[in-house]
Image (spheres, rainbow, N blue to C red):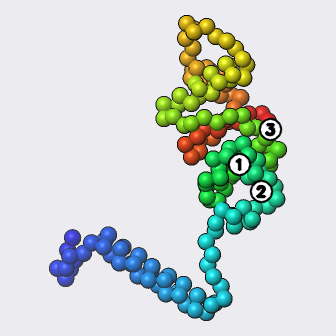
Amino acid sequence: MRDAGDRISCPCLTLRCHLFINVLHMTSLMKQWRDANPDCQVVPITGATWYDNLSLTEQELYDMIEDRCPEFTKLNGELCQEFMDTLSDYGIKTADDFESAYFAQFEYAHDESHYGEFVEYCVTEIDCKELPEFLVIDWQASWYQNYRHDFITIEFDGEVYFFFAHF
């Protein structure tokens, strides 16, 4: 694109220049603030800091999650908070709520076979049904027809968590 002065002009380049100038300005402002406030330090939030900043109810909820789902010990505070916020969206806000609602978890599968695994687990392990080997059951269809109404599922960090919908 050429402008009136026969110079090459690009709107994207102009936008990048403006963004770069804004970044330089913000960097300058941050340096001025740090120089004016030498006693203040920017401290990154670690897992321990995140946990300490939770309310007592939230700490108890996290402790219950970690007790039932030990893989949470490897996650950072931001991811743990994201999971707790998702739980809260479903009304699971306390450790007692979590304990009442949590049922099981399975590894996430792109083909959604985790739903079939869940139903098969419920029938064979929980209900202790011994089924003949020649019987063919579409466990995934059973999920969609019958079980999905009674459970909440949360896909998170490579796992699918199953919770009772009516806890």
Task: Tally the marks.
Answer: 3
Residue at label 1? 66
Q: Is residue 121 above or below residue 33?
A: above
Task: Inspect the image, locate mark 2, and give the three-letter code of the amino acid beneath it.
Answer: Gln
- Residue 76 or residue 84, whichever sits in front: 76
Q: Is residue 37 above or below residue 136?
A: below
Q: Judging from the image, what secondary structure is the residue with disc 3 in? A: helix
Q: Position of residue 65 (x, y in %)?
A: 72, 47
Would residue 112 be visible to someone looking at this image? yes
Q: Judging from the image, what secondary structure is the residue with disc 2 in? A: helix
Q: Real-space Cα distance between discs 1 and 2? A: 10 Å
Task: Inspect the image, locate mark 1, and give the three-letter code of the amino acid beneath it.
Answer: Glu
Tell me the crowding category of disc 2: few under 14, some 14 to 19, or many 20 or more residues within 10 angstroms, Cα based: some
The numbered mark, 1 or 2, whose residue comes first in the sequence reads 2
- Residue 65 or residue 26, whichever sits in front: 65
Q: Residue at x 27, y 72 (%)?
A: 10
Quarter-of-image position of residue 14: bottom left
Q: Position of residue 164 (x, y in %)?
A: 73, 33
Residue at label 3? 100
Q: Real-space Cα distance between discs 3 and 1? A: 15 Å
The numbered mark, 2 or 3, whose residue comes first in the sequence reads 2
3 or 1: mark nearer the eye: 1
Tell me the crowding category of disc 3: few under 14, some 14 to 19, or many 20 or more residues within 10 angstroms, Cα based: some
Q: Position of residue 114 (x, y in %)?
A: 57, 30
**Quadrant of image for the N terminus:** bottom left
Residue projecting furthest to the left = 6
Task: Inspect the image, locate mark 3, and give the three-letter code of the amino acid beneath it.
Answer: Ser
Q: Real-space Cα distance between discs 2 and 3? A: 17 Å
Q: Is residue 1 left or right of residue 81?
A: left
Residue at label 2? 59
Q: Residue at x 64, y 59 (%)?
A: 77
